[in-house]
Amino acid sequence: MLKRIVQLFIIIAGGTIGYLYIPEVLNLLNLTNGNWVESPYAGLVFGAIILYLISFWLVDYIVDFLRWVEETLIKAPVGDLLFGSLGLILGLLIAYLITIPILDIDIKLVSQVLPIFVTFLLGYFGFQVGFKRRDEFLNLLTLAKKEKEKNSQTDVEADTESAPKVKILDTSVIIDGRIADICQTSFLEGTVLIPQFVLEELQHIADSSDVLKRNRGRRGLDVLNRMQKDLPVNVEIYEGDFEEIQEVDSKLVKLAKVINGIVVTNDFNLNKVCEFQHVQVLNINDLANAVKPVVLPGEELTVQVIKDGKEHNQGVAYLDDGTMIVVEEGKDYIGKTIEVLITSVLQTSAGRMIFAKPKLLEKAL
């Protein structure tokens, strides 16, 4: 059926072209002698016959192309088609407004060819912008709806105050766990947003074959469950994604720009990237610098020495939140669980580092 429709369309197109242009071509070639060949209706017949004969070779390619386009459109998500079509319509509308003055130009080549080029170009750009930036448009619509609902529930005095920005959590700060304690004390205002791509990375860590990574991932999931169920904070999941961006940190920065949010992290590198791109960032480690550290010199801890340190005879252990403990003279205790005495604590934006020595050596001295 589709093949017959395409052939019919080709015949009609051929007849139209023949009716309009074959007499002009004959006049241009000085082949006119006043006979019936000059008639536009004869051109209509000739054009239809010529394109009908060509259609036997061309129709299969056209039908295959149309079926490919049909399958592609059927498989495409509805959101992609919707925003792509809206972008296409907007591009064609702008092209129409631009080509109105072009049609008045006396140069025939410009007035006939340039509008076609402008229409195609702006239509293409409109579709690409609508298709590739659909997540941002959807997010703007969602935030506008939520903001409208929030404003309808507040009084006139609350409307005069600026609402707190959305806080976007990254993987490192979730695993760290201190964000839950901060939320419990109500120091963090506004909505806490957990992007879906951060949850996927956290789940990937929790499924790791490495014991330390698996424990950290599960700890992060426990922290999220606690924040959502037990703490007085509004936790929401951002379902969108930026498929053209591969790295999770880059997606976080992009999301913060789109929704004008604040990135919450304890990743030193992400902190610097946010500052460079003028994205507001809250670093949990910077907050820890302003208060007492979790452990103090002179305290005792029970840790498992995991590996060698950088310096001679050093061993390295980790707390549950990933904090590194450098154990002096701890190389001989690798693979063992020992009690250590904290000697000093170093706190920077890159994280917290604890220096300790085995308690057994302290007793021996």
Image (spheres, helix red, strand yellow):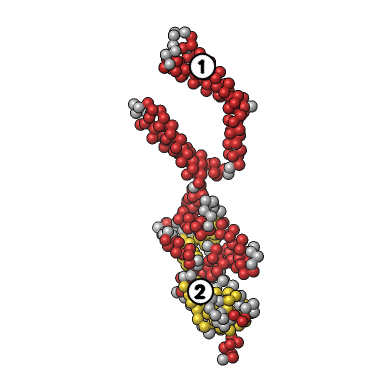
In the image, is residue 36 above or below residue 359? above
The span from disc 1 to disc 2 (Cα, nearest Å) is: 85 Å
Q: Residue at x 52, y 21 (%)?
A: 14
Q: Among all residues in the image, which is located at the extreme right?
A: 209
Tag 2's secondary structure? strand
Tag 1's secondary structure? helix
Q: Where does the image place residue 230, in percent across and percent down from the top left?
A: 58, 66
In the image, is residue 358 above or below residue 162? below
Is residue 131 toward the left or the right of residue 103 in the image?
A: right
Q: Residue at x 50, y 67 (%)?
A: 266
Q: Residue at x 55, y 76 (%)?
A: 309
Give residue 328's quadrant in the image.
bottom right
Disc 1: which residue: 44
Q: Mark 1 vs mark 2: give the one in front.
A: 1
Determine crowd level at label 1: few under 14, some 14-19, many 20+ residues with C-alpha closer than 10 A.
Answer: many
Q: Say if residue 145 shows up in the picture.
A: no
Q: Which sits earlier in the primary sequence, circle 1 or circle 2? A: 1
Q: Say if residue 61 shows up in the picture.
A: yes
Disc 2: which residue: 352
Q: Residue at x 48, y 67 (%)?
A: 268
Q: Nearer the viewer, residue 274 or 15?
A: 15
Determine crowd level at label 2: few under 14, some 14-19, many 20+ residues with C-alpha closer than 10 A.
Answer: some
Q: Nearer the viewer, residue 69 or 182?
A: 69
